[in-house]
Image (cartoon, rainbow, N blue to C red):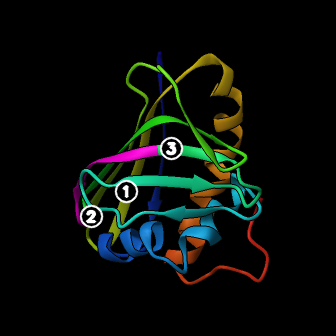
């Protein structure tokens, strides 16, 4: 399993960026880069189950590995959801980590994740769009249409 990384600097506090990333209203707005009708069902607490949906009954099954508010979130992907049914997969250590580091009112957001070859191209194309959406929302410059 390969590890890939994406990062951006956002002109907002770590708390603001965190709230955009994991807020109920904002999560679907920035994740539209991955799926037009993206959603998440979780309370984001360590050990909690998470289902990341695409609006069609499909998506990803995960567990929250770690949650340090405004600093670090780690999500372990366990499988897929197809037609509303959960299917566990053995992907090794497919962690998706969000690291936030604030300095002088700006926040560096770094995403790193373990990825299988099959998904690498997709995420290399979509993560930069998603990070731009997070930046726009956190900086208050989001337009009516967010990049998909």
Label 3 sits on a secondary structure element that is strand
Q: State the image coordinates of residue 50 (x, y, percent, origin top left).
A: 44, 54
Residue beneath disc 3 = 61
Kindly report the secondary structure that dominates the magenta region of the rendered protein.
strand
* 65 sits to left or right of 142: left
Does residue 139 lie above or below 60 as drawn?
below
Q: Are marks 1 and 3 in contact (CB under 8 Å)?
A: no
Q: Return the mark for residue 102.
A: 2
Whole-Å distance between the Cαs marked 2 and 3? Answer: 30 Å
Q: State the image coordinates of residue 3 (x, y, percent, origin top left).
A: 45, 24
Residue under the image location 35 percent in, 68 percent down: 106
Label 2 sits on a secondary structure element that is strand
Q: Find out whether residue 90 is within the magenta segment.
A: no
First in sequence: mark 2 or mark 3? 3
Give the mark count.
3
Label 1 Cα crowd, 10 Å radius (few <14 / some 14-19 / many 20+)? some
* 86 sits to left or right of 42: right
Label 1 sits on a secondary structure element that is strand
Q: Which residues are magenta?
A: 62-69
Q: State the image coordinates of residue 65 (x, y, percent, origin top left).
A: 28, 44
Q: Are marks 2 and 1 in contact (CB under 8 Å)?
A: yes
Closer to the camera in the image, 70 or 8: 70
First in sequence: mark 2 or mark 1? 2
Q: State the image coordinates of residue 126 (x, y, percent, origin top left).
A: 68, 45
Residue beneath disc 1 = 108
Whole-Å distance between the Cαs marked 1 and 3? Answer: 27 Å
Does residue 78 lie above or below 126 as drawn?
above
* 43 sits to left or right of 67: right
Residue under the image location 62 percent in, 44 percent down: 85
Whole-Å distance between the Cαs marked 2 and 1? Answer: 6 Å
Q: Return the mark for residue 72.
A: none
């Amino acid at each position: 399993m390969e590890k890939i990384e994406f990062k951006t600097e956002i002109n907002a506090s770590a708390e603001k960026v965190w709230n955009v990333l994991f807020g109920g209203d904002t999560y679907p707005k920035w994740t539209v880069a991955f799926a037009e009708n993206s959603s998440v069902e979780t309370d984001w607490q360590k050990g909690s189950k998470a289902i990341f949906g695409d609006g069609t009954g499909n998506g990803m099954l995960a567990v929250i590995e770690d949650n340090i508010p405004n600093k670090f979130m780690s999500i372990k992907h366990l499988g897929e959801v197809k037609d509303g049914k959960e299917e566990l997969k053995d992907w090794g250590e497919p962690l998706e980590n969000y690291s936030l580091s604030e300095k002088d009112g700006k926040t560096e957001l770094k995403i790193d994740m373990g990825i299988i070859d099959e998904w690498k191209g997709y995420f290399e194309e979509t993560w930069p769009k998603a990070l731009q959406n997070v930046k726009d929302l956190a900086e208050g410059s989001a337009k009516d249409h967010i990049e998909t």
